[in-house]
Amino acid sequence: MPELPEVETSMRGIAPHLEDETISQIIIRQPQLRWRVSDELQQMAGVKIHKIDRRAKYLIIRTERGDILLHLGMSGSLSILSTSQNQEAGKHDHIDLITTNGTILRYNDPRKFGAWLWVEQAERSPLLSKLGPEPLTDEFHADYLYRQSRRKTLAVKNFIMNNTIVVGVGNIYACESLFMAGIHPELSTQNLTKKQCECLVSVIKSVLSKAIIQGGTTLKDFIQPNGKPGYFAQVLQVYGRKGEECNDCGTLIKAKNIGQRNSFFCPQCQEFPR
């Protein structure tokens, strides 16, 4: 599933092609995704696109007539094409946004679990209004994380993956961040120290920033808008490495289901405190 770095990469990939352009039409081949595609999208001809934004794992196409809220779901991807290429849509190419200069933003989603919704203002949407801070902003800092941790008793991995606490720290990057911080994923949040919160905030920012530079992580479904894979998978320390030796200490990486998600960790570097 595309996580924050993959969505950020997608945003950066499509923005230069769409910002300040005018929508010619939006072709909807499959109206039923996770939620039904908004009928308003078929009335966007002649509407100018002002900006492409991201909030958490949502892309926001800001126009002079409201916002288009886009989510890639489990397997969605975007590509930039041109009408001059005359490239026919494939089986899973569900939506085309076409601009007057001939640019096509094509949405592909085999599992049909993404979303294309029109909202008057994205920030007021129930999907976004209760989200926590962005992890790469100054709003996400050690004191904030420590205060939030005092109110919770769940495992720290579930805590940092909670979008009301901080957005965009999905399964891959939670595993990697906890490894780099030397924190066992099952440690109760109420036992986190201020020093651990300082370290965890720092490594979350570092891991996500590096993943964005690498273009995200391609494991199965994600590709960048230019058709290239994300390369962060080549530097993963624990995620997906069950049974392999830890790069730091040589102990075999373990996997365990935590919060209904497969979690990877080094039992030596992330020893559970007794």
Image: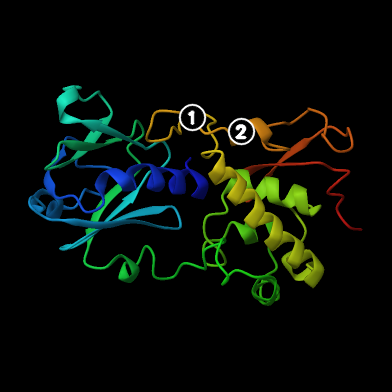
Q: How far apart are marks 1 and 2 (CA)?
A: 10 Å
Please say whether residue 258 is visible from this viewpoint: no
Q: In this view, does 249 lie to the left or right of 4?
A: right
Horizontal and vertical percent position of residue 63: 20, 59
Q: Where is residue 23 in the image (x, y as percent from the top left)?
A: 14, 48
Indicate whether 4 appears above or below 128: above
Q: Mark 2 points at which residue?
A: 233
Asked whether the beta carbons under mark 1 and mark 2 sit within 8 Å of each other, the answer is yes
Is residue 187 visible to us here? yes
Q: Where is residue 210 in the image (x, y as percent from the top left)?
A: 61, 46
Disc 2 crowd, CA 10 A, few/some/many (<14, 14-19, 20+): some
- Which quadrant: the C terminus? bottom right
Q: Label 2's element?
A: helix
Quadrant location of residue 27?
Answer: top left
Residue closest to the eye, 145 or 260: 145
Residue drawn at 57 percent across, 67 percent down = 165
Q: How crowded is mark 1: few (under 14 residues within 10 Å), some or many (20 or more)?
A: many
> On the picture, is 92 further left or further right than 164?
left
Q: Which residue lies furthest to the right in this view?
A: 274
Secondary-structure class at tag 1: loop
Snapshot quadrant of residue 234: top right
Q: Where is residue 267 in the image (x, y as percent from the top left)?
A: 85, 43
Q: Name the residue under label 1.
A: 229
Q: Foreground residue, 192 or 225?
A: 225
* Residue at 57%, 61% in the rendered image: 135
Q: Which colour scheme is used?
A: rainbow
Q: Which amino acid does label 2 sit on?
A: Ala
**Residue at horizontal 88%, vertical 32%?**
250
Q: Residue 253 carries which label?
A: none
Look at the picture and state if 269 lies above or below 82. Answer: below
